[in-house]
Amino acid sequence: MYKHVLLPTDGSELSMKGVERGLALAKELKASATIVTVTPAWSSFDMASEARMGHADPIETFEKEASEAARRILDDAKSKAEAVGLDAKLVHLADMHAAEGIIKAAKEHGSDLIVMSSHGRRGVRQVILGSQTAEVIATINIPVLVIR
């Protein structure tokens, strides 16, 4: 059925539940798995504020912190993959909108299923808070299994 499962995570408890469920499914299907985390581009407003406060090279600091956070997220996800006996590929995409990065990773890695979590917000709360899951579903032609 499915041969390659993409598992996006931002490291939150909710997204890691999606990773865990996705890993279990990949193992059951004997599919390969890729775990992806996406870090956003730096905000010019935040960087200007940091520079005004006297912080030297705020962009380099941001990129270093984002890279370190991604490594922690992926290390945690890797340990979950190893716990179920999978050797998942780990991917960090930097300087991207989350949904854009997930879609890019799915296409580049030949994924035929995406398993991701969602808060299940509706109406005004979804509009205000946004939904990476909804954006992925609306944009990509690959099946998306949503874990709530």
Image (spheres, helix red, strand yellow):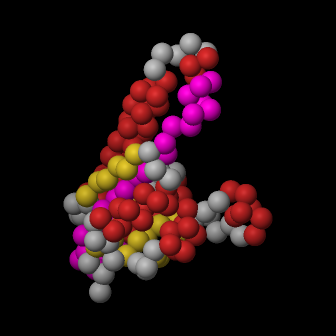
> Residue shown at 71%/63% (left/top)?
127
> Residue shown at 41%/52% (left/top)?
37
Q: Is residue 141 visible?
A: yes
Specify whether residue 19 is painted magenta: no
Residue span colored magenta:
23-49
Residue at the far right in the pictured view:
124
The quarter in which the N terminus is drawn is bottom left
Image position, residue 73 (x, y; %): 40, 46
Q: Toward which corner of the image does residue 84 lie, by quadrant?
A: bottom left
For residue 126, side relative to residue 48 (left or right): right
> Residue shown at 24%/63% (left/top)?
86
Q: Is residue 82 above or below residue 67?
A: below
Image position, residue 128 (x, y; %): 73, 58
The quarter in which the C terminus is drawn is bottom right
Q: Toward which corner of the image does residue 121 lie, by quadrant?
A: bottom right
Image position, residue 13 (x, y; %): 52, 53
Q: Is residue 75 above or below residue 122?
A: above
Residue 27 versus residue 7: which sits nearer the camera?
7
Image position, residue 136 (x, y; %): 50, 69
